[in-house]
Amino acid sequence: MFALNFNNTDMHIFYGKVALIAYLKTIKTTNSTIGFVPTMGALHQGHLALMQRSLKENDDTVVSIFVNPTQFNNPEDLAKYPRTLEEDVKKMRVLSDKIILYAPSVEDIYEGETVSQHFDFDGLENQMEGKFRPGHFDGVGTIVKRLFEIVTPTNAYFGEKDFQQLQIVKKMAEKNNMPVNVVGCPIFREDNQLAMSSRNERLTPEERKEAALIYKTLTAAKELFQTSTPEETIAFVEESFQNNERFTLEYFVIADEATLLPIDQRNKDKNYRAFIAVFVNSIRLIDTISLN
């Protein structure tokens, strides 16, 4: 399907890659830049902040909304993932009617074969999320690579909440010689400092309030890490969640930012980051914080 306009605005919406590619060819020039923000929809202020940055830094901005089945290792999680295209379009229109939206079907992306390509990310895929969500980063690599090939962006914007994903996308672009600048953007947080996520919509008001414990614990761990060993810092975080029955800590890892490998001791010349995944009842939330 070709571009549709909602309420006679200038915002272009594409449901098929052929039409999108054809349109982008008409607006590209030798010196123009395209910014790209890939999302799975259920847009929040964090997504909109990425779009604002792209609009500011590029001649044109493309946003994709696609719930990618190959990066979900839990079918129930895929089924429950919020799909709110109409509301998402309204939010983007308020931001700018110059955004180009690509909202494809699974068929348009995968052409009848909904499987992941296998990637070697030099070991980045084996830590944290990769360890607990088998196949997840093959799914991420597959969809981002296909979207980069379709949109051919100059700059692509990703939030640092998914820092491991950010590093993996950078590695994927580098290994596939894709001429795109992958830009990491600061985490956008709610008033209680909970990292913004589409999954937050599934939390009850009480759960959302109590989930402030995640960032509170991360900031305390950062402070402790300055004077304690990694082992002592990890023990502190584990104890913090053991004392609250509403939470189940899946992992807390202190890792080298470059390699994502867990560390046993500190080296003053390296950058470290803490990564956490927590279940609030059945809803899985992740967060991260720089320890330097």
Image (cartoon, grey):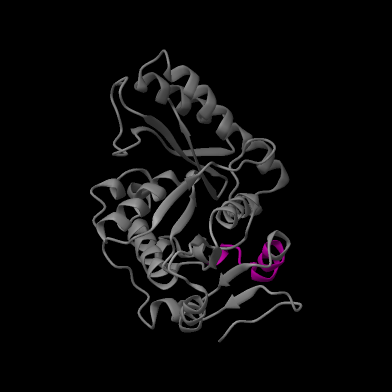
Which corner quadrant holds the C terminus? Answer: top left
Q: Which residues are magenta?
A: 79-92
Quarter of the rendering containing residue 134? bottom left
Picture coordinates of residue 202 (x, y %)?
A: 64, 54
In reply to whether residue 86 is colored magenta, the answer given is: yes
Picture coordinates of residue 73 (x, y %)?
A: 40, 60
- Is 153 located above or below residue 107 in the figure? above
- Is 32 located above or below residue 276 in the figure? below
In this rendering, would 138 be left or right of 250? left
Q: State whether the magenta stretch is mostly helix, strand or loop.
A: helix
In reply to whether residue 91 is colored magenta, the answer given is: yes
| Viewer-side residue, 217 vs 56 | 56
Q: Residue furthest top?
A: 227
| Viewer-side residue, 40 vs 242 | 40
Quarter of the rendering containing residue 215? top right
| Viewer-side residue, 48 vs 244 | 48
Determine the residue positioned at 30% across, 23% down.
269
Determine the residue positioned at 46% across, 22% down.
236
